[in-house]
Image (cartoon, helix red, strand yellow):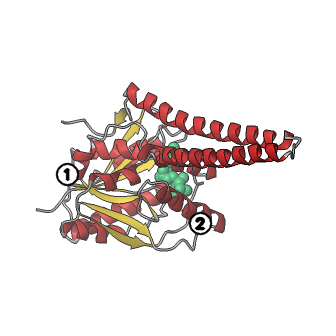
Amino acid sequence: MKPVLYIVIPCYNEEEVLPITAPLFLDKINELVKLDKIDDKSRVMFVNDGSKDKTWEIIKELAKSDEHFVGITQSRNRGHQNAVLAGLMEAKELCDITISIDCDGQDDINAMNEMVDAYADGCEIVYGVRSKRDTDTFFKRFTAESFYKLLNNMGAEVVYNHADYRLVSSRVLNEFANYKEVNIFLRGMFPLVGFKSTSVYYERNERIAGESHYPLSKMLSLAFDGITSLSIKPIRMITGLGIIVVLIAIILAIYSVVQHFLGNTTPGWSSLIVAVCGLGGIQLVSLGIIGEYIGKTYMETKNRPRYIISERTYDEEK
Ligand code: UDP
Ligand code: MG
């Protein structure tokens, strides 16, 4: 039996790109149906992430124009990760496999053929991995690559150069639904679910139109979320740092006592200031990081919904 595929596409203020890329996704569905790889019940599912422009109107038009297009909208902007999650959770009831991809045409949709083949070969998760970043600016490349290195060094395991272009079977998504956390970092969470997985390599293009919604500030906050929601290594590092500082302080204390008895009375002011500032700084950093985890715990205990779908282009049937 051929699998039903849902291509899940988060869209935030994408009125410029959507009319260009939507037909490409439809062509891909039709091609895969023709190649007998997927069922004709397969769909392109747009998730409007509370856009402020005409994105949702465009999605509704698309849904009217072809039955292969469907759309859902979030009640407000919740961010890329939550939009993808909303789409995946919605789609898992309706299909056998999902492929999540951005709507800006940067990820090569032809890699989907290979992804679907890998699923046919028994893989439940297929990661789309960028083979090179020639089209990115030096700055974007540098920051993006540092991002993956930082994540891995901090104990958040992620597939290098894999963003959110991936195939996931509904079987995996049903298990994934039990990961109830509110702070979500999908690319770091799927490896935790397990199951047989593989990677497919593709070249990343430039954005077809519109602007990136991921400036450095958002990327840093994503990295920070990724680290603090997946690992407690930073807390351990703080503990290690604390131990080193204490050891240094002991050595300094011994040294100053020895100097005192040798009669070398020093003014002592500078060493005092250094100690006060150093320790003060370290304590502030530690408090900040610990506070981050406490804040996360606080958010998690609230158990708020991670997405709210306010409208669909089709009737909800469950
Ligand atoms: N996106 C979203 N909600 C947001 C920001 C972005 O759904 O708050 C979507 C956006 O429409 C796009 C994808 O996430 O489909 C990736 O965003 P973008 O292309 O701006 O990021 P970049 O590729 O530059 O990292
Ligand atoms: Mg993009």
Foreground residue among 109 and 269: 269
State which quarter of the image contains the N terminus: bottom left
Whether residue 12 can be seen here: no
Q: Which residue lies furthest to the top in this view?
A: 302
Helix, strand or loop for disc 1: helix
Say whether disc 1 or disc 2 marks the residue closer to the N-terminus. 2
Question: Mark 1 = which residue?
Answer: 171
Circle number at residue 56: none
Helix, strand or loop for disc 2: helix
The CA distance from mark 1 to mark 2 is 34 Å
Residue at the image point whose x is 46% and y is 34% from the top: 296
Left or right: 62, with 289 as reference point: left
Residue at the image point whose x is 87% and y is 44% from the top: 266
In the image, the residue with mark 2 has its CB under 8 Å from the nearest atom of ligand 1: no
Q: Is residue 44 above or below residue 1?
A: above
Question: Mark 2 = which residue?
Answer: 141
Residue at the image point whose x is 49% and y is 59% from the top: 153
Residue 82 drawn at (x, y percent): 42, 42
Foreground residue among 167 and 154: 154
Mark 1 residue type = Arg
Whether residue 3 can be seen here: yes
State which quarter of the image contains the C terminus: top left
Left or right: 302, with 210 as reference point: left
Foreground residue among 164 and 23: 164
Label 1 crowding class (10 Å Cα cut-off): few <14, some 14-19, many 20+?
some
Residue 204 drawn at (x, y percent): 49, 69
Mark 2 residue type = Arg
Label 2 crowding class (10 Å Cα cut-off): few <14, some 14-19, many 20+?
some
In the image, the residue with mark 1 has its CB under 8 Å from the nearest atom of ligand 1: no
Residue 227 drawn at (x, y percent): 48, 48
Q: Marks 2 and 1: in contact by CB < 8 Å?
A: no
